[in-house]
Structures are given as structure tokens and as C-alpha cells.
Amino acid sequence: MAWSVVLLLSILNVAGLDEPQARVRVTHRDLIPTCLNAAAVAPGKRSWNLEPGRFSMVLTMKQNGRAGPASPGPASISFDVEAGHRYEVEVRATTEAFSSRVWRRGEWTPVVRDRTTERIVSAAPEWIEGSCAGAR
């Protein structure tokens, strides 16, 4: 019996399951992650399991505007994650932006919310030129 417990613990350790990760997910359909820690994000990728620590993410908004084109610009945010916590990347904007789906640079704000503690854990966004190269 004792050897089976040791074997199970060894398997879990090899699989990396002994150290809990943080779950990070982008929630708003128009919010597009382009970089995570200065590395390009694959198109359509919207969630990650991350080791505890500090991260930066660059995001932009998909334009579905009914009121003409706008330039959403990329925004860079930084945030810390803790093991075992769940995080959501959300967007803050005016009701007009949400209803018109026109996202203008500086008029929308990405935030990271820790759903485990219900706190915003991201710093204020920095509006950058380009994508990954301009990230903090």
C-alpha cells in the first residue's frame, strides 16, 4: 500500500501537478489578446494556466462598429497571479462604446480581476505603439 502512494506522488510530481497554477481567461468577445510576456499569442487563444508571478499582456479590441471605424490601439497591462486563483481579463468602457461597439484608443480599459478574491489586480493600462515590442 505504501509503495502505491509513493508511486502516485511521483507521477503527480513528474506531471507538474504538485504546484497549483493560476487560471487566466479573457471574457469579453471583442477583447483580443495579442501578447503575453512579450510573446505573440496564437489567434483565438483566450485562456492560460500560469505559474505564480508577474505577467504583462497586450490587448486590442475587435471592431464591430455600427458608427464607423475607430482605432482601438493596443493597451499593455501588468498583473500578478497567485497559485490556485482564477482570473478574468475584462474590459471597462462607456455605455456608448458597448452599445455602438466602437472602441477608441484610450476610451476602453482592460482590467484583470481575481475571481477568487473579487479584486482588480492589474495596473492601469499603458497605450503603446505596435504590439509585443512595446509591452512592459
Image (cartoon, grey):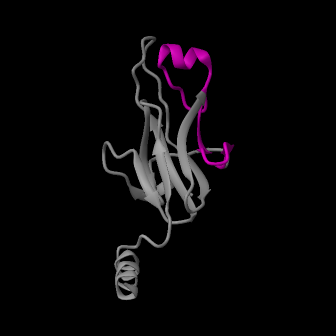
Q: Position of residue 85 (x, y in %)?
A: 57, 54
Residue 135 seen in this snapshot: no
Write down the region rendered in magenta: 93-121
Residue 131 seen in this snapshot: yes
Q: Is residue 136 left or right of residue 59?
A: right
Q: Position of residue 124 (x, y in %)?
A: 67, 45
Q: Is residue 120 left or right of residue 18?
A: right
Q: Quadrant of the C terminus?
A: bottom right
**Residue at point 49% right, 31% down?**
72
Question: Is residue 134 shown above or below 32?
Answer: below
**Residue at point 47% right, 29% down?**
71
Between 33 and 119, the one nearer to me in the picture: 119
Q: Is residue 40 magenta?
A: no
Between 75 and 32, the one nearer to me in the picture: 32
Q: Quadrant of the N terminus?
A: bottom left
Q: Position of residue 12 (x, y in %)?
A: 38, 75
Where residue 14 sits, quadrant-wise, is: bottom left
Q: Position of residue 27 (x, y in %)?
A: 47, 36
